[in-house]
Amino acid sequence: MGHRLDPYEEAKAQLRESLDILGYPEEYFEALAVPERVIQLKLLVRMDDGSTRTFIGWRSQHNSALGPYKGGVRYHPDTTMNEVIALSMWMTWKNSLAGLPYGGGKGGIRVDPRRLSRGELERLSRVYFEALSEFVGVDVDIPAPDVYTNPQVMAWYYDQYSRIKKGSFFGVVTGKPVEIGGLRARVVSTGLGVAVAAREAASRVLGGIEGARVAVQGFGNVGYYASKFLSEMGASIVAVSDSRGGIYSSKGLAIDEVSKVKQATGSVVNYKGVEKLLASSEVLELDVDILVPAAIENVITEENAERIKARIIVEGANGPTTKEGEEILTKRGVLIVPDILANAGGVIMSHIEWVNNRMGGWISEDEAKNKLVEKVRTMFNSVWDYYESKIDRDKHNMRAAAYTIAVDRVVRAMKLRGWL
């Protein structure tokens, strides 16, 4: 794949394109490109063998014009400060596009959590959130799960914060276990949102989702649930992959069976009865109708864009397509449903959970899922209408439409508040 691209540079390029479309002055670029605060943390953690290891963590608080910062925390060995800043900027646009009362935030720790024991992971999580405790809060900054974090990690965050602040602050994090204020629907929400966005795109490009051949790169939470819901909608999931490789079957995969194998063995490649095994990157280049990159950023680049055969790309991951790769795909007529639209289901459900916590419990799981589905459909329709009516489609694509709507709302809020 070549050198690893800087996601912050990608995010800034996307921002500049939107500002150019809107006709805003250059001074707005710096006002929106630079995060309001970036916190770097040195985390000293006692390991099971008695030694002490030092980890580095970050929290980027990009923009609060629309409300408190909102975004997940990822644990990954390749996490960098610039990646966290870029992700926080994307969260600003995602929350804005969804019409949520949130700004953008994101956190990360440079660690491979798979190499830690449960006890070490808990101690790391508690140290991280204690260090962040003066910078987060129910009306300040509300973290959530992301790559390699989950409801259990959120439970540790919530408990550590409640110990420090001496109270029960359920809304300080979302994506929590049901027993302490979470919603069961939060686990499925991002994947469900991806599936709904794919269905809406397919209705416009393919004539419908039924029978559409789908490849999914990344079979974690988002990839699994996107696959599951798309299968239930009538699509055929012909390929999935994880960090160890991919599997392909022209007849379609039994998604729940694949998931069981992954849970039991650690990888989808151990699933029997497939036609062939693939490298994870090969899944991107299969002859399918819809491609869902649901792993990490910068997997679709100028180096492989010409080999991608899908007619629709639905970005389950954050920033999986570089600007250079996107330009190639756009010229070829490939529809890209951008991340800030496609994977907004997680933060939409987080907002429902946050409101539910503050109201003392008000919504059922089915109601929560129905609200998410309707929200994603509404978002897609608004972006599609803007894309068709107000965007020069010879120069710009659906991402530009989504970003332009989102950026304009943030700018207007900043003006109303006297920041610009």
Image: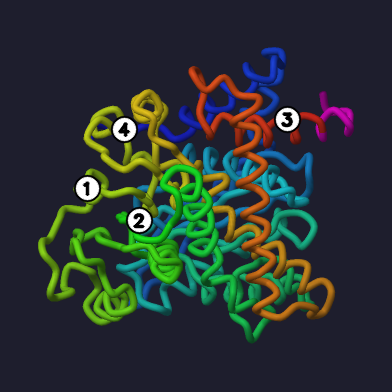
Q: Earlier in the sequence, mark 4 or mark 3?
A: 4
Q: Are marks 3 and 1 in contact (CB under 8 Å)?
A: no
Q: Which residues fall within the magenta stretch? A: 413-420
Image spot of residue 273 (x, y percent): 12, 74
Residue underneath mark 1: 286
Label number found at residue 408: 3
Image point (25%, 82%), residue name:
264
Number of other residues with Cα within 10 Å of mark 2, as a class: few under 14, some 14 to 19, many 20 or more: many
For label 3, the SS is: helix
Residue 156's place in the image compared with 101, above or below, is below
Residue 291 lies, with reference to residue 241, above or below; the image says above
Query: In which image quadrant can residue 294 be found?
Result: bottom left
| Foreground tag (4 vs 1) | 1
Q: Indicate which disc, 3 or 1, sits on the residue closer to the N terminus.
A: 1
Q: Position of residue 303 (x, y in %)?
A: 24, 30
| Residue identified by numbered label 2 | 212
Q: Are marks 4 and 3 in contact (CB under 8 Å)?
A: no
Q: Mark 4 is on which residue type?
A: Thr
Q: Residue at x 76, y 29 (%)?
A: 411
Q: Is residue 159 left or right of residue 149?
A: right
Name the residue beneath numbered marker 4.
301
Q: Are marks 4 and 1 in contact (CB under 8 Å)?
A: no
Q: Residues within 10 Å of mark 3 (few under 14, many from 20)?
A: some
In the rendered image, the quadrant that contains the C terminus is top right
For badge 2, the amino acid type reads Ala
Question: Which numbered disc, 4 or 2, marks the residue that appears first in the sequence?
Answer: 2
